[in-house]
Image: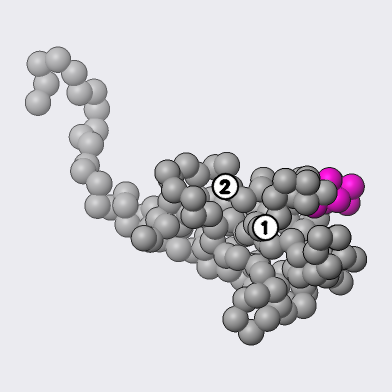
Amino acid sequence: MHDWWTELSEVFYVAVDFDGTIVYDEFPQIGPPVRGALDVLRKWQVDPKISTILWTCRDGQYLEEAVSWLRSKGLEMPVNENPDIEHGNRKLVADVFVDDRNVGGLEGWRQIAQHIWEGQRKHEIRRRRLRKKLHESSPKVPDGPVGRGRA
């Protein structure tokens, strides 16, 4: 399934894993933050064109601890769902996923940030092209008032 709705969105959605990505993996405890992670996440949090989603397997008490830890670091984000997009299944809708179990492993957060900003710029270009294409292919509305008795 192609996630066309994210391509039309002005927001670039980034799903970020917790253990091993934001913090070093010491589950069930919370490890120390991965170098650079908090700085980058704070920058994304104030960027209106990027929406960060916590994407984690933690649940129950362990999830609550992770969310509280993030709040204590000044970070608020939705957990395991994209509140902007309802689509009727459990697959998380995001433009990219940042995870230590990514093919090739986790890059440094400076490189991750660069990839996201480049991806966001490409997303903006695709969004503009897609909107233009949709606008060009939509039925043309005649100029002037259209009402009763008019064709």
Q: Is residue 1 left or right of residue 91?
A: left
Q: Is residue 139 left or right of residue 123?
A: left
Magenta part, dominant SS: helix
What label does residue 56 carry, if any? 1
Q: Is residue 72 left or right of residue 93?
A: right
- Report x, y in % for residue 7: 45, 57
State the residue at coordinates (87%, 65%).
31
Q: Quadrant of residue 40?
A: bottom right
Report the amino acid beneath label 1: Thr
Colour mode of the rendering:
one colour
Task: Look at the numbered disc 2 and give the secondary structure of its residue.
Answer: loop
State the residue at coordinates (14%, 15%).
148
The disc, 1 or 2, on the residue closer to the chain's N-terminal end is 1
Q: How many marks?
A: 2
Front-most of residues 3 and 100: 100
Q: Quadrant of residue 21?
A: bottom right
State the residue at coordinates (90%, 66%).
32
Q: Is residue 20 above or below residue 129?
A: below
What label does residue 82 carry, if any? 2
Q: Which residues are magenta?
A: 66-73
What label does residue 122 carry, if any? none
Magenta includes 68? yes
Front-most of residues 77 and 135: 77
Rounded to the nearest whole Å, what is the CA distance between mark 1 and mark 2?
Answer: 13 Å
Q: Residue furthest bottom?
A: 104
- Report x, y in % for residue 9: 50, 50
Magenta includes 121? no
Front-most of residues 143 and 51: 51
Q: Residues within 10 Å of mark 1 (few under 14, many from 20)?
A: some
Q: Is residue 91 above or below residue 34?
A: above
Report the amino acid beneath label 2: Asn
